[in-house]
Image (tube, grey):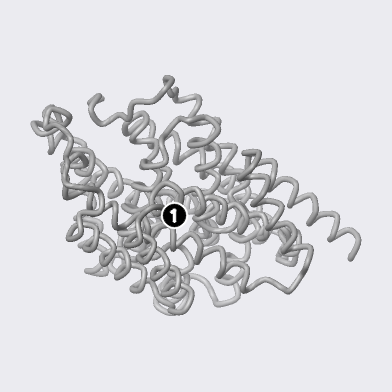
């Protein structure tokens, strides 16, 4: 592994650490990608000090500009910065494993016993906990990346307002690009750059064999998807792989943005599932931890059992992770250049605004429950003041939801 691409840390970060940490976080990562980001901030940045906050902010900035599930791409980036490509694979598998096992069980029960989805109230108070975690993380990002600069504060507030008032992933893309442009033009990081010696070794190996293979594979997947190659393929596993890998590389904005497009492809074009089955798959993805795109496993299971489920799962997450690692390599080569630092200095306030907006949107769709607001406030205080692990905070919220369910059954 090229040592210049590995982030120096206070202590050696083992594969075992990556596995244990992301497995634990993956088991309680309810509430969208910003929830997982908040948990990573608490565990890896503040408690374990495995990565500095800048690395997490960089991962969010890069992942937000790329197709595929944002949270998983951020995890891949962190694993890559800590332990290279193998570290990325370990981190991604670990964070997805709890959701995969839960979705496999639910898929089997659904298609075997016509299991119904009426248990979303179990997660009633996890939403408040997630919102509190996101707000506390946004506050940490504000303190580090926004505070002290009126220009950065304006960018942050403008991004927050735009994301709360306007809909559509195009808004996010425009804001990120505008923030980067402002950072570059106004030199928000400063004029000074790091010594060129920091990147000399990587300059000679920009296109190593894995990178070239990734670029060729990603190009082939994209061409096959837009050429509608799945329509002409007779082998079911190959068709599943072509469809879900194409979705992974062609849709931006995370899982919720992808849902209507997936419905159009799977229900109306391919007729693989009907509307009710599609919606049940989405509902199950809300009952399980992890990204909403784990629902691809549910649809793959319907088509071809466990084999189809695993093919759909790999096809959904592997291509976007490959793209993330390819882009991360080029970023690692050029990250010390002044223009890159200035661009990121403009993007980071946008990311802070994105976090705050996601928390507000999450709270907007929840019922007006004083206890729910209290859970959010308590979570914010405990996470910020006492650095309590999000695992325990979310476990407490789940327990509260179970008590509520039992009392109102």
Pick the residue in front: 3 or 364: 364
Pick the residue in front: 259 or 24: 24
Q: Is residue 318 left or right of residue 228?
A: right
Q: Does residue 235 show up?
A: no
Residue 328 percent coordinates (x, y): 26, 43
Which residue is farthest top? 12
Where is 84 relative to 370, above or below?
above
What residue sits right under mark 1 in the picture?
A: 312
Q: Does residue 193 show up?
A: yes
Pick the residue in front: 283 or 172: 172
Q: Is residue 160 left or right of residue 170?
A: right
Residue 71 percent coordinates (x, y): 45, 52
Residue at x 51%, y 45% (from the top left corner): 96
Where is 407 relative to 325, above or below?
below
The image quadrant where one finds the N terminus is top left
Where is 392 relative to 403, above or below?
above
Where is residue 257, by image quadrant? Answer: bottom left
The image quadrant where one finds the C terminus is bottom right
Residue at x 47%, y 70% (from the top left corner): 259
Q: Is residue 156 left or right of residue 118?
A: left
């Amino acid at each position: 592994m090229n040592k210049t691409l590995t982030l120096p840390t206070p202590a050696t970060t083992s594969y075992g650490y990556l596995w244990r940490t992301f497995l634990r976080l993956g088991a309680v990562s309810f509430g969208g990608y910003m929830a997982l980001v908040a948990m990573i901030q608490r565990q890896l940045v503040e408690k374990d000090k495995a990565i500095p906050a800048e690395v997490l902010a960089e991962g969010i900035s890069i992942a937000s500009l790329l197709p595929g599930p944002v949270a998983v791409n951020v995890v891949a980036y962190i694993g890559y910065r800590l332990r290279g490509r193998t570290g990325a694979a370990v981190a991604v598998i670990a964070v997805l494993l709890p959701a995969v096992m839960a979705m496999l069980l639910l898929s089997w029960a659904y298609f075997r016993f016509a299991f119904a989805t009426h248990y979303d109230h179990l997660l009633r108070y996890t939403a408040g906990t997630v919102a509190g975690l996101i707000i506390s993380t946004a506050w940490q990002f504000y303190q580090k990346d926004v505070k002290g600069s009126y220009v950065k504060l304006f960018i942050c507030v403008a991004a927050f307002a735009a994301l709360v008032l306007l809909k559509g992933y195009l808004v996010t893309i425009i804001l990120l690009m505008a923030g980067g442009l402002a950072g570059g033009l106004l030199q928000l990081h400063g004029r000074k750059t790091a010594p060129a010696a920091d990147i000399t070794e990587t300059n000679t190996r920009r296109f190593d064999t894995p990178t070239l293979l990734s670029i060729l594979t990603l190009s082939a997947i994209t061409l096959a998807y837009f050429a509608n190659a799945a329509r002409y393929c007779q082998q079911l596993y190959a068709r599943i792989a072509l469809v879900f890998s194409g979705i992974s590389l062609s849709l931006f904005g995370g899982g919720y943005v992808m849902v209507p497009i997936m419905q159009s492809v799977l229900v109306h074009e391919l007729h693989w599932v009907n509307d009710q089955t599609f919606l049940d798959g989405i509902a199950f993805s809300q009952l399980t931890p992890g990204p909403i795109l784990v629902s691809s496993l549910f649809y793959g299971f319907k088509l071809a059992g466990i084999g189809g489920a695993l093919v759909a799962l790999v096809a959904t997450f592997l291509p976007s992770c490959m793209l993330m690692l390819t882009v991360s390599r080029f970023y690692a080569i050029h990250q010390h250049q002044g223009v890159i630092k200035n661009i990121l200095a403009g993007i980071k306030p946008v990311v802070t605004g994105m976090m705050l907006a996601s928390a507000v949107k999450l709270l907007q769709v929840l019922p007006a429950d004083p206890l729910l607001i209290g859970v959010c406030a308590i979570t914010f205080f405990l996470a910020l003041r006492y650095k309590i692990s999000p695992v325990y905070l979310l476990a407490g919220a789940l327990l509260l939801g179970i008590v509520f369910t039992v009392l109102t059954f």
